[in-house]
Image: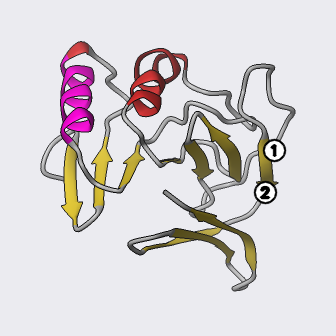
Amino acid sequence: MPSSHYQRSLPNLDVFVLNSNSIGDRQTRWLRRHLAASTATWKIVSLHHPPYTCGGYLGNPAVISRWVPLFERFGVTLVLAGHDHNYQRFAAKKGVTYLVHGGGGQKLYSLRNCPAGYPKRVVARRSHGFLDIVVRRGTVRLKAVNLSGKVIDRHVLNP
């Protein structure tokens, strides 16, 4: 990692990697500036602590209050997080799809009902596995795969 937060760009794609362990003014100003300047079709944010999760943890209040408004305002397509050791995908809220995949190998956490005000959770699985993301000009294809190779979720994002 080149720094605690950074951006990587490919044609039509900007990926913003954030440090959710340190949600301060400096990083938030950086995020606002870089999201506002992005002209990419696809804007994907990756961070550790999810704004929305309903398992061993609930969403991070600082991410919700400081960064979610920026995700919504500047057209972020997808927010990827871990922290909760399970798989959850939420329906898009103001154009932003939120996905938690913390099933990389540690003990799995149980799932629970989500609080009022959260986006609707459309998929929830206690499963180890990985996430396959394919970005094309007109779509982003998401596929969550468990350790047996079974696809546990598929989703397509359109601009």
Query: Considering only order in the chain, which callout, 2 or 1, is on the residue closer to the N terminus?
Result: 1
User: Residue farthest to the left?
Assistant: 2
What residue appears at the point 24 percent right and 49 percent down from the top-left corner?
39
Pointer 1 with pointer 2, Cβ within 8 A: yes
71 left or right of 90 in image? left
**Three-letter code for the amino acid on which mark 2 is drawn:** Arg
Q: How is the image coloured?
A: secondary structure
Percent across and percent down for residue 115 are 79, 22
Q: Quadrant of residue 31?
A: top left
Tell me the tag on residue 80: none
- CA neighbours of label 2 inside 10 A, class few (<14), some (14 to 19), many (20+): some
Q: Main structural element of the magenta stretch: helix, strand or loop?
A: helix
Up-down relation of residue 123 to residue 131 (above or below): above
User: Residue farthest to the right?
Assistant: 113
Measured in 3D between alpha carbons, the distance from the residue under mark 1 to the one under mark 2, in whole angstroms, is 7 Å
List the residue tagged with mark 2. 126
- CA neighbours of label 1 inside 10 A, class few (<14), some (14 to 19), many (20+): some
What residue appears at the point 47 percent right and 48 percent down from the top-left corner?
77
**Three-letter code for the amino acid on which mark 1 is drawn:** Ser
List the residue tagged with mark 1. 110
Question: SS for tag 2?
Answer: loop
**Viewer-closest of 155 and 158:** 158
What are the residue bounds of the magenta stretch?
26-37
Is 72 part of what is drawn in magenta?
no
